[in-house]
Image: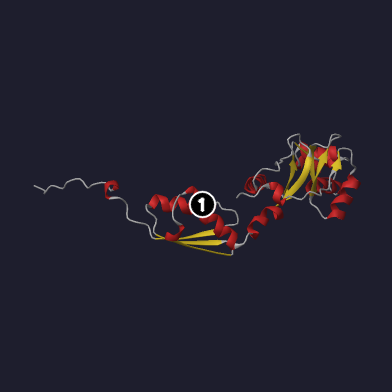
Amino acid sequence: MKAAVKDVMTTRVIWVRKNASFKEMAAALRGHRVSAFPVLDEHDRVIGVVSEADLLAKVAALDSEPGVLTGIRRQREQDKARGVTAGDLMTHSPVTVAPDDTVEHAARLMSQRMLKRLPVVDANGHLVGIISRTDVLAIFDRSGQDIRKEIITDVMQNEFLIDPKKYKLTVKDGVVTLSGVPETPELGRDLVQRIWHVQGVVAVRDRLAYPPPDRDDVPSMPPRFPAG
C-alpha cells in the first residue's frame, strides 16, 4: 500500500499573512526553528512561501556597497532585498501537494525543485498541513515483516499471480534479497523492478537463477560455406 502525504505530514503549521513584517517573520523562523512557512490570503489559501533564503537576501543587501547589488543580482533578488513584508519577499505560485498524493510524488517534487518542505493544500487551496524531507523519510521506518508481507501478498500473489513458495524472500534493514527460479527471464526482471517500488525498500538484491532464453528466441547463425 502506498503511503499518502496525509499519513506523514505535519498538521500544526507556522504560517503568516501577506502583510506580516520582516521582523515578525524573522522572529517566527527563529522561535519555531523552521526554515520556511506558507503565506496565506484572507481566505486561508496558500499564495506563497517565505524561506530563510528570502530573508537572507535582505540581510546580505544591508552589507553591500551602494551600487554593487545592482550589478551582481537579478531584478527579482533586488526586489526581495528591498522588501519589508511577506508579500514582498515570498515566492509566488508555490509548489504544493494534496493530502492524497503519494509520498513518492512529494519526494520527487522536493528533489526536482530542491525544496526542503511543501505546503499541503485541499481542493480549494486551503492549507491543511506541511510535509518536509524528514516526513518523507518516514516511509523507511516500515518493519521488514510489513515489507515482506506486502511483497508476498500484493506483488507476488495478486499482481504477478505466482506462488511465493517457489522463491526465497528475506528483508533486513529495508534491503530485499530474492532468490529462486522464475518461469522466464522477463518475469524475473519485472518482479525485481516491481519490488523496488514497494514503500520502505532501500535496495533489492537479485539472486534469481534466470532460465536460459527460449531456443525459438535465439537467432540462428547464417550458413557458412567453404572458401574456394
Q: How many marks?
A: 1
Front residue of 191/111: it is 191
What is the x, y in percent for residue 217? 29, 46
Could you tell me if residue 193 is visible in this image?
A: no
What is the x, y in percent for residue 147? 57, 58
Judged left or right of residue 84, residue 213 is: left
- Residue at 41% over, 51% down: 187
Q: Callout 1: 10 Å neighbours few (<14), some, many (20+)?
A: some
- Residue at 55% over, 59% down: 148
Could you tell me if residue 136 is visible in this image?
A: yes
Q: Is residue 32 above or below residue 54?
A: below
Q: How is the image coloured?
A: secondary structure
Front residue of 156/206: it is 156
Front residue of 27/151: it is 151
Judged left or right of residue 146, residue 214 is: left
Residue 175 sits in quarter: bottom right
What is the x, y in percent for residue 25? 87, 47
What is the x, y in percent for residue 173? 59, 64
Judged left or right of residue 94, residue 157 is: left
Residue most extreme to the bottom: 172
Q: Name which residue type carries label 1.
A: Val
Residue most extreme to the left: 228
Q: Is residue 181 above or below residue 114?
A: below
Judged left or right of residue 35, residue 208 is: left
Q: Secondary structure at mark 1?
A: helix
Q: Which residue is mark 1?
A: 155
